[in-house]
Image: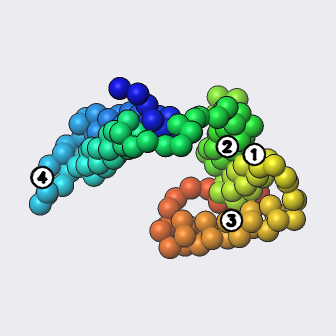
Amino acid sequence: MKIKSQKDFFSGLMFMVVGIAFAWGATKYTIGTGARMGPGYFPLMLGVLLALLGGVIAFKALVVETVDGDRIGSWAWKPLVFIILANLLFGALLGGLPSIKLPPFGLIAAIFGLTFVASLAGDEFKFKEVLVLAVILAVLSYLAFILLLKLQFPVWPAFITG
């Protein structure tokens, strides 16, 4: 069978792999029933639905004809690297890295680091716009996670709060 849309086919495969991984990982928790759901119920159902959706998309890519075959382009390495680095930096700044004696810098610094590094993934970098975005995200994150949800993690660096 010939692949008629590479983009759809490989997207469907990716969805199926991620869905199967979630469903398989969920089996390590108590599943429960529809009336009394356990902690593994939602990730199992989400994984199964994602795998089914991926199957439908991959099947469609084998059946529906496209004009140019929807070829997959080259990898976008710059955005990939900067987005992954931004997430790693967020985790390191939020919780610290005890193995290298990096203290937690807190939520606000982590949001600023995430925003600035992730913005480098784009084609152009405008400092003022990124700064405004970082401030808005930091304020909204503080309101949502600290004030409303009352989550317990550092907001400011340890050397400021003591």
Is residue 26 something that shows in the picture?
yes
User: In which quadrant of the rendered image does the N terminus lie?
Assistant: top left
- In the image, residue 75 lies at what x, y percent? 66, 32
Instruction: Indicate which label's residue lies in the foreground, 3 or 4.
Output: 4
- Res 92 visible: no
Q: Which residue is mark 1?
A: 121
Q: Between residues 130 and 16, which one lies in front from this camera angle?
A: 16
Q: Is residue 100 above or below residue 131?
A: above
Q: Amino acid at mark 4?
A: Thr
Q: Which residue is mark 2?
A: 83
Q: Nearer the viewer, residue 113 or 55?
A: 55
Residue at mark 3 to residue at mark 1: CA–CA distance? 20 Å
Give the CA distance from mark 3 to mark 2: 18 Å
Q: Amino acid at mark 1?
A: Ala
Q: Quadrant of residue 58?
A: top left
Q: CA distance from mark 3 to mark 4?
A: 39 Å
* Upstream in sequence: badge 2 or badge 1: 2
Evaluate if marks 2 and 1 touch, with contact meaning CB atoms under 8 Å apart.
yes
Who comes first in sequence, dot 3 or dot 1?
Answer: 1
Q: Which amino acid is tagged 3?
A: Ala
Q: Residue at x 66, y 47 (%)?
A: 90
Going from N to C along the chain, the mark reached first, 4 or 1, is: 4
SS label for mark 3: helix
Residue 93: x %, y % from top left: 68, 46
Lower position in the chain sequence, tag 3 or tag 4: 4
Q: Nearer the viewer, residue 22 or 16?
A: 16
- Helix, strand or loop under label 4: loop
Q: Label 2: few (<14), some or many (≥20) within 10 Å? A: some
Quickly name the residue at label 4. Answer: 33
The residue that label 3 is drawn on is 138
Tag nearer the camera, 4 or 1: 1
